[in-house]
Amino acid sequence: MKIVPREIGNLVNLQTLDLRNNMLLIDNVPQEIGRLVNLKKLSLSGNRLVALPAEICTLTSLKELECANNQLLQIPGEIGNLTGLTKVNFSANKLTAIPASFGNFSELQIMDVKSNEIAELPNTLGGLKSITKIDLSHNMLTELPWEFGDLTTMTVLDVSHNPLTLPPNPVVMKGTEAIIQWLKKFEKEGRKGKVSGLEIQTEEKDKK
């Protein structure tokens, strides 16, 4: 299927819509998709979208949004309107940033943005109070937000294949719990710009 018919807007009670692995461009997704007010799960993975249709950001009943394996260059800030989301997947796109409005997702449990070109994360991600898994692997991150130290519900944080300097590599190699504890412990000093000294201190401790 290369075009989603406009008549899809008549399915107002639809809860799951799977449009994976088609050849969809943004112009092939009609505005009428915004009428699916009861939609809980939407998958647009495996298409050719370079942008997210604006109407999707009005579907406030959504719980799961999958947009992996497209050509997305950015995510609109209006996505923060979808405060009921529990799972988002934007892996394997061309994203360079994540909107600050992701911090609105207080019910989000799983966030997958691996295999993009993300170089920086907003500190608002500290608002993900229900998060259990974040996959940031295969990006261009050099630092994690200090606010990640507040994500006490997180059990899996994958930051592999990033040029991270903060936290330092010895901490990253120890896994999720060590990363969270380090960010929490050294937040005050780190915000004062003493990161390089902390890195040396941590490496020396690991050698003992």
Image: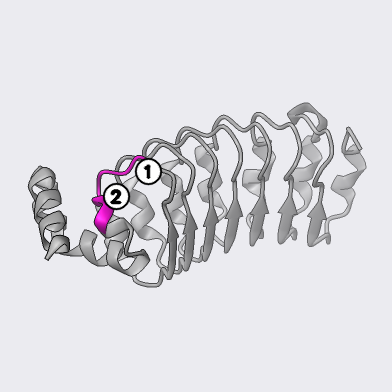
Label 1 crowd bin: few (<14), some (14–19), many (20+), radius 10 Å: some
Query: Which residue is found at the position 53% from the left and 46% from the top?
Result: 114
Q: Is residue 165 magenta?
A: yes
Relative to 65, is 73 above or below? above
Query: Which residue is found at the position 25% from the left and 52% from the top?
Result: 167
Label 2 amino acid?
Pro
Q: Quadrant of the C terminus?
A: bottom left
Label 1 amino acid?
Leu
Residue bearing mark 1: 121
Taking the image as shown, residue 59 lies to the left or right of residue 8, namely: left
Q: How many marks?
A: 2
Q: Looking at the picture, how far across and down is residue 194, in whole percent? A: 8, 46
Q: Looking at the picture, how far across and down is residue 171, in whole percent? A: 26, 59
Residue bearing mark 2: 145
Query: Which residue is found at the position 74% from the left and 45% from the top?
Result: 44
Of residues 11 and 174, the one drawn nearer to the viewer in this rendering: 174
